[in-house]
Amino acid sequence: MNFPDAFDPDAGVPMSPDGLGSAPATGPADTPQTRSPSFRLAYLDPDFMLRKDLRPLRFQLELLKPDLILEEHGIDSTVVVFGSARVPNHEDAESAMQAAEAALTGDPENHELKRALAISRRLATHARGYAAARRFGQLAAEFSKANPGRELTIITGGGPGIMEAANRGASESGAQTVGLNIVLPHEQAPNPYLTPELSFQFYYFALRKMHFLMRARALVAFPGGFGTLDELFETLCLIQTGKSRRMPVLLYDSAFWTRLINFEMLVEEGMISPADLDLFQFVDDADEAFQIVADYHLNNPMKRVGRGKV
């Protein structure tokens, strides 16, 4: 974790933590006492800030920083787009498939290469989802231009694949677009279509999830893996239990979702109520999906949420 020096960058003088006054112009004398970690200002001491005991404070910081910045940028209403980071655009899908075919040609009995080719072909079919997510982001941007004061901002996990596509569509149409990246064992760089000032990084999944829903007016889940399923079912559970406000939850690509999850079986087994099936709906067209979101947004005004109910 990097901490800034305690200086006002404009005035070039040391600042107090609250920015209301300045510290002495020169630092203290170099002595064993001043070199001790205990002498560091608490908010500039990474060893102190990263202690287990300070976890509640780090929770608060991860809640406050994005919230304040989003508020400063006038972002009140968002549309959350989830989906696999592995879904390529059409060009990359074709290149990957050709490379897999060439590799198998050189070793036709290799089972791993056969599997790689099969997966590349399946992912190529999902490239249409990339195009749809990009189109959805474009529609959100166009809606925002046509409805000042009622803008809808695309927010994603900030990574590649479907996330990139939705951010891309919005960015290419001139809109602000938000990404909530997460620290992972394998590095995930923010996609290049995020508004730089709205590209955030989280350590705690729980705080990231809160920010997905704090300003959400709808959620669109494209085909994805564990991460997409986690976010989708968390949202459905929160809406089902009244912890989150009711909003459109759209599952894009009905064939994928009905093959993946037998929702009717949950009703038949008594695990959910028949009415719970109304918490979401399937869509197969980006324009249809956005129209559902836009109609809901225009007909159900939402008060400014800030740090209120998610």
Image (tube, helix red, strand yellow):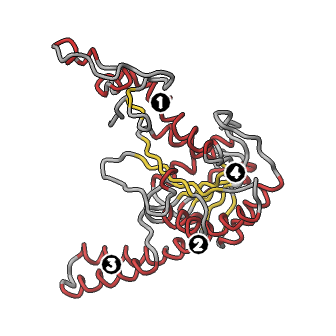
Image quarter (top left, top right, bottom left or bottom right) of the N terminus: top left
In terms of sequence position, does the residue under pointer 4 or pointer 1 come before the other? Answer: 1
Q: Residue at x 51, y 23 (%)?
A: 20
Could you say where residue 158 lies in the image, as x and y percent from the top left? 47, 55
In terms of sequence position, does the residue under pointer 2 or pointer 4 come before the other? Answer: 2
Residue furthest to the top in view is 33
Q: Residue at x 49, y 63 (%)?
A: 193
Tell me, yes or no, whether the two marked residues, 3 and 4, touch with CB atoms within 8 Å: no
CA distance for labels 2 and 4: 19 Å
Q: Residues within 10 Å of mark 2 (few under 14, many from 20)?
A: many
In terms of sequence position, does the residue under pointer 3 or pointer 1 come before the other? Answer: 1
CA distance for labels 3 and 1: 43 Å
CA distance for labels 3 and 4: 39 Å
Task: Identify the mark at residue 217; answer none if there is no mark.
Answer: 4
Tell me, yes or no, whether the two marked residues, 4 and 1, touch with CB atoms within 8 Å: no
Residue at mark 2 = 132
Residue at mark 1 = 59
Amino acid type at circle 4 is Arg
- Depth check: give the residue in front, 286 or 149: 149
Query: Depth-wise, is mark 3 or mark 1 nearer the camera?
Result: 1
Task: Identify the mark at residue 117; answer none if there is no mark.
Answer: 3
CA distance for labels 4 and 1: 24 Å
Query: Depth-wise, is mark 2 or mark 1 nearer the camera?
Result: 1
